[in-house]
Amino acid sequence: MMAELSQWFGSLPISLAMRRITWLVPMLQTLHILSIGFVLSSIIMIDLRIWGVSRSGTAIARGERFMPWMWTALAVATLTGIALMFGAPRSWRDGAFVAKLYLMVGATAATAATAALPIMLRRNQCGGKDAGVPAQLVGIAALALWLGATLAGRGRWIAGALGG
Amino acid sequence: MKAFTEFLHWVETTPLALFVSQSTYGFSAIDMFHIASVSVVFGMIAILDLRLTGMAFSDFSVADLTRQVLPWTWAAFAVAAITGGLMFSGQAVKYSVNFAFLAKIALMALAGLNVLVFHFITYRSIAKWDQGVPVPWAAKFAGALSLVIWIAVAAYGRFTAYYMFP
């Protein structure tokens, strides 16, 4: 089913037009990679405060500081990603791409939870080192899931290696 | 130049290079980690660059932000350099004449120079502009240059692959 969907995507006029502009796909891929970098770095910066590696400010303030960057970057990554489904439609064919979409959903939820947990647990002592163990664990999960999604995004070879 | 080309030919015959060029999935697996680590390098450096240029995070201490950002940047850069080196070794001669690749390497050298100047000259007066005051123009310039260079490095990295495997 995915293979047919991919072929149909590739045959659309917009897909053909995009591939005729030779620099468009690598340009979109560059934007995609850079925005993913912002997503990963935002969650790393929030995690560093929540883990207590950094003690400056409060965990809540750190979340408020970086979440807007995270959401904006995620929006850019999603939009360029959707555009790339037309410009380079082969990605629809393999399981790694589908796995990436699931990982993204989990990672987004975990990231939102990482920023929200200190607020819910009322951990806003100024300079306090403890954002709470639940937030620390969810923060690790969020980073792991984002890294997983990033790797799976480039992992179309995995399906081939596994004989898919 | 001839000796250099011969050297690159020799690089391609080393066992690791042969693994990269001959194995069915070796290159793609390495490439996967290259892209992921490059994105982390860019994201972490960009946070510091945005602070230096004054575009964002002005309430953070520059020294504190640097302490948080740099370990992740260097760790990710190490992964990117190793995986990049491996991919290069597989087809060293072809990369050495790829315009986008050469531009990328030249820009990274410029980024390195920028870091050296910033670290050994501009950063020495950090105590005066660490927090709450505007950063000096030299630091603003270093941040802006770094941001532009790394965006271009990422773009040339992508175009390298496009010229190699059209």
Image: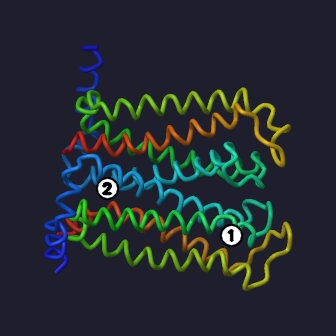
Establish if A112 lies above or below A16: below
Q: Residues within 10 Å of mark 2 (few under 14, many from 20)?
A: some
What kind of element bears circle 1? helix
Establish if A2 lies above or below B51: below
Residue at x 84%, y 49% (from the top left corner): B132
The circle on residue B29 is: 2
Pointer 1 chain: A
What kind of element bears circle 2? helix
Residue B111: x and y, percent?
53, 33
* Rendered-image quadrant of the C terminus of chain A: bottom left
Q: Is residue B54 left or right of residue B161?
A: right
Q: CA distance from mark 2 to mark 1?
A: 33 Å
Residue at x 40%, y 50% (from the top left corner): B34
Residue B162: x and y, percent?
25, 44
Q: Do pointers 2 and 1 mark residues of a single chain? A: no
Q: Residues within 10 Å of mark 1 (few under 14, many from 20)?
A: many
